[in-house]
Amino acid sequence: MNASFVEKSVWVQVTALIAVLGGYFWTAKQMFMAGVMDIRAYVAVFAVSVVMLVIVLVAGHIVVAITSRGDFSDERDRLIAWRAEALSSWVMGIGILSAISAMIVGVETVLVAHLLLLSLLLSEILANGLRILFYRRGV
Amino acid sequence: MPKRALPIGNCIRALRAEHEDMTQQHLADRIGVTRQTIIAIEASKYSPSLEVAFRIADVFGVPLESVFQYLPERTA
């Protein structure tokens, strides 16, 4: 792939987020379907997922650093990051508003917490996806 | 994936050839950007900042308008 260190880093981030946190949400769904309503049970699983995410990100970035030529971040990387953030932040906003609404109508705490987490995850995936699109298509 | 050409054209590739086949990496190092940014500029997939544009012109020792051209017909 003819990509800079930063672009490869974005690929690592989006892949790790989808794989690890996607796995967490799949597990959480199974737990919820099984009737687990104690949020502390989810916190333990989430903590394990975060540790796994950090390990995958560190390992991925080591590989990327080895296969890159000591690139750095330049004005194009910054512009792409800014545009992607500007176009993806609405997902997090909708998630927060939905979570507040859910709390008002008395939805289970477990669901509200996961709604917030999901909106954060989707916002990050969208931001990274847009960055990849801008790198490939142009900006 | 559809590739978008911006309305700013350039002749950096030709200027590199005229300057002892300067590599994209060499030019990138001279102006302080990554080689991928030079590739994107040459392919009209990225319009550089005014500062980087002036730096590129300075490396080749030519005025800015000899490096970059505005191509309004590319504006959809």
Image (cartoon, coloured by chain):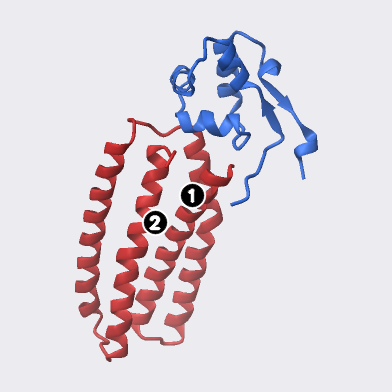
Chain colours: A red, B blue
For disc 1, the chain is: A
- Residue A133, image x and y in percent? 53, 50
Q: Farthest residue in the right direction?
A: B73
In 3D space, how far apart are the residues under numbered discs 2 and 1 (Cα atoms)?
9 Å
Q: Residue at x 60, y 33 (%)?
A: B43
**Which residue is denoted by mark 1 in the rendering?**
A132
Examine the rendering and report whether any part of residue A52 can be seen: yes
Q: Nearer the viewer, residue A117 or A133?
A: A133
- Callout 2: 10 Å neighbours few (<14), some, many (20+)? some
Residue shown at the point (48%, 79%) measured from the top left: A101
Q: Is residue B48 above or below residue A56?
A: above
Asked whether the residues under the numbered discs 2 and 1 touch, taking CB atoms below 8 Å apart as contact, a structural biologist would say yes
Q: Is residue B4 left or right of residue A32?
A: right
Give A51 or B9, whichever is nearer the viewer. Answer: B9
Tell which subunit mark 2 falls on.
A
Residue kind at label 1, given as amino acid type: Ile
Q: Residue furthest bottom?
A: A35
**Same subunit under labels 2 and 1?**
yes
Q: What residue is drawn where x is 28% and y is 45%? A: A61
Name the quadrant containing residue B73: top right
Q: Nearer the viewer, residue B14 or B50?
A: B14
- Which residue is identified by label 2? A14
Assign a secondary structure to mark 2. Answer: helix
- Check disc 1: other Cα within 10 Å, few if <14, some if 14-19, many if 20+: many
Quarter placement of the C terminus of chain A: top right
Could you tell me which quadrant the N terminus of chain A lies in? top left
Q: Quadrant of residue B8?
A: top right
Q: Is residue B24 left or right of residue A46?
A: right
B22 relative to A67, above or below: above
- Residue type of the residue flagged with mark 2: Val
Residue B36 location (% of width, % of height) = 48, 33
Q: What secondary structure is marked by label 1?
A: helix
